[in-house]
Image (tube, rainbow, N blue to C red):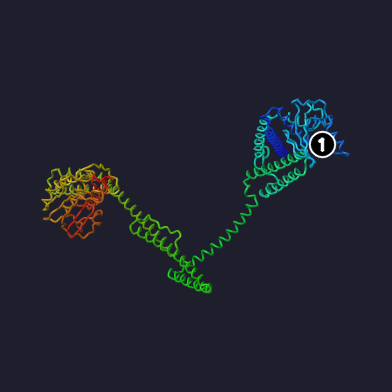
Amino acid sequence: MKESTGTARKTVVFLAILCAAAVAALCVILGYLFRANSFYVYSLDSILESRDHDLMLPDAQEIAELTVFEKNGSDMHAQWKRWDASNTNLRYVLTDSHGEVLHSNTSDFRADDPGWTTIYIRSNSSASHVDLFTNPPGSTYGSKNYVFYGKVDEELPVSDAYRLTNRLIRTGYALRWAIIPAGIVSFLAVVALYVVLLSLSARRPKKEGLYPGPLNGVPFDLLLAVSAFFGAAAFLIFMGFSKHTEFMYGVAITGALCGLFLLSLFLGLSMSAAARIKQGTLVKNTVIFRLCGLIKKIVLFLGRGLKKLGTHLLAFLRSIPLVWSTALAIFLLLVLNFFALLVFFPRIEYYFFFVIFEFLALGVVLVLRAVQLKRLEAGGRMLAEGNLGYRINTDGMFSDLKRHGEDLNRISDGLGRAVEMRMKSERMKTELITNVSHDLRTPLTSIVSYADLLSKETSENPLVKEYAEVLLRQSERLKRLIDDLVEASKAATGNLELQLAPCDAAVFLEQTAGEYRTRMEEAGLELRVSAPETPVTIRADGRRLYRVFDNLLVNILKYAQSGTRVWLTLEKQRIGQAGFAVITFRNVSRDPLNLTPDEFLERFVRGDASRSSATDGNGLGLSIAKSLTELMGGSLDLGIDGDLFKVTLRFPTEESGVAGQ
């Protein structure tokens, strides 16, 4: 029962769409006819008068021909009876050019009455028809002129074309404005009902899910083709009927039936399409989709076969060494040239063109290989320069070169991972040093304090005071080591807060040298300072810069040969547009310099290889100085020439605009 209710609902909506569409189409046709006949421009009387004139022209021609040519026969009486006043609403008078009445069906005629329509007629004796004119025609040889006066009876007592046309025009004129809103409402009703019909497709009242119709299993494109066939057949039948009949009412009825049939086909297809869209089978349930799926399977099957064959062939070619593959290519070229020579021997000029084409193709291959080799060369150079992030583009490379490029990329990846692991190890070591040093500070502070208190206590045993002084001296050394470790780790990780400001490097160097001059003299060293008289301004953190100078001078005090000179120099240098302040520390080493500059800059490396306690050092001074210099935007380089030990600091000057960046 519910299923029949849903079907009845769809049927009602379907029929309502047909009715509304018919009304809308009728309004459009009537609107077109009303506009074509100037219903919206002229008055009703003007339109009626124009239409009566159009109907009167063929009647005037027929009456004139009956009168002028005096046709005889058994049917003449029937033809003249048609124009009797009792059989037509047309009242007419036909006169010759002199005004003599030749034929008439009314006695109520006055030539000066404006209600009569005047039509001028000219006959030719050599023809069996007359010509109609709006204005009086000129006279020609062998022709006669006539005047036709016509008028439609206002009462319209007879049922003929004049009365039918009059009533249709009056009715249409009265409805000319009403059809516009009626057409709009009908069109909106069609759209609304169409949406409702689509929403009802594949649905049942008070039931969930989809219930498609019996045609849902038919492929949609096949259903569309069948519908197009029947639609085209209906249209052709209508066109054939309209060409072979003059019965306008029959043409109109046939056209209306054809339109309703086409609309019904469209609505049925729309309902089926809506149901398939709701199910998601509109595209899948088509012959074209299934055919494309079959073609896809065939193509994939063939593709897999070709891919497998190509893989085996490529594997075979790759297994051939580069030298042998090159020799094989040369051999194939020779064979190809031999057969080409045999083929083109009668026309040797063709062989000449073949050789040119062959050399062009070979040249293209060689150029491509050269370009790929250039790519490999650039990749190797970038890898050698330490650019581990550079990747060689191996797209389009030949097999051997592509493998070589991929190997270089893998080497780059491996080196990158190794560098990353080393950096990670360095960070972990730095963090470990920082954390352990921080944890050692608290107990070490207590040890230093109690050692100091113990050294100040009076005791009868003289060894107690000596032991306390040793304990205090070693605890102070341990505290300095921990402080250096913390500062070295902070400098290496960039965690130091710097307060960069302009400072005169010459003044700063003179002040620091002045603090160490006395200690240098006590150590048997002669300190010499050379600096320009003009200020050399750099951007640096004064406290950190002092620490750099202090570490370098302490290093000189520890390891310089007694009785030698120590040189501190400050110079200005310019490289391109940039200016630099170059500060150099030179001294003669007491011990042989058997380490490289890079080894000296490593942590815990001291000048005395035996690492004896003769010098109060921990091997962190140079490493800390280098890290602090780089944090302030400068650079530190070591130089060794025999026993000459040289440290060079380079800072951008303030006017160069580079400092502090």
Q: Position of residue 542 (x, y in %)?
A: 21, 43
47 versus 335 height, above or below: above
151 versus 521 height, above or below: above
Q: Amino acid at mark 1?
A: Val
265 with respect to 508 (left or right): right
Residue at 65% over, 34% down? 188
211 with respect to 565 (left or right): right
Residue furthest toward the front?
141
Q: Quadrant of the N terminus?
A: top right
Nearer to the camera, 424 or 158: 158
Nearer to the camera, 222 or 540: 222
Residue 179 location, quadrant: top right
Give SS at disc 1: helix
Nearer to the camera, 615 or 414: 414
Q: Is residue 174 visible?
A: no
Q: Quadrant of the C terminus?
A: top left
Q: Position of residue 274 (x, y in %)?
A: 64, 43
Residue 76 location, quadrant: top right
Residue that label 1 marks: 68
333 versus 86 height, above or below: below
Q: Is residue 295 visible?
A: yes
- For the image shown, how many numbered marks are present on the structure? 1
457 versus 600 height, above or below: above
Around disc 1, counting alpha carbons within 10 Å, would you say few (fewer than 14), some (14 to 19), or many (20 or more)? Answer: some
Q: Position of residue 442 (x, y in %)?
A: 25, 44
Nearer to the camera, 634 or 553: 634
Q: Position of residue 253 (x, y in %)?
A: 76, 39
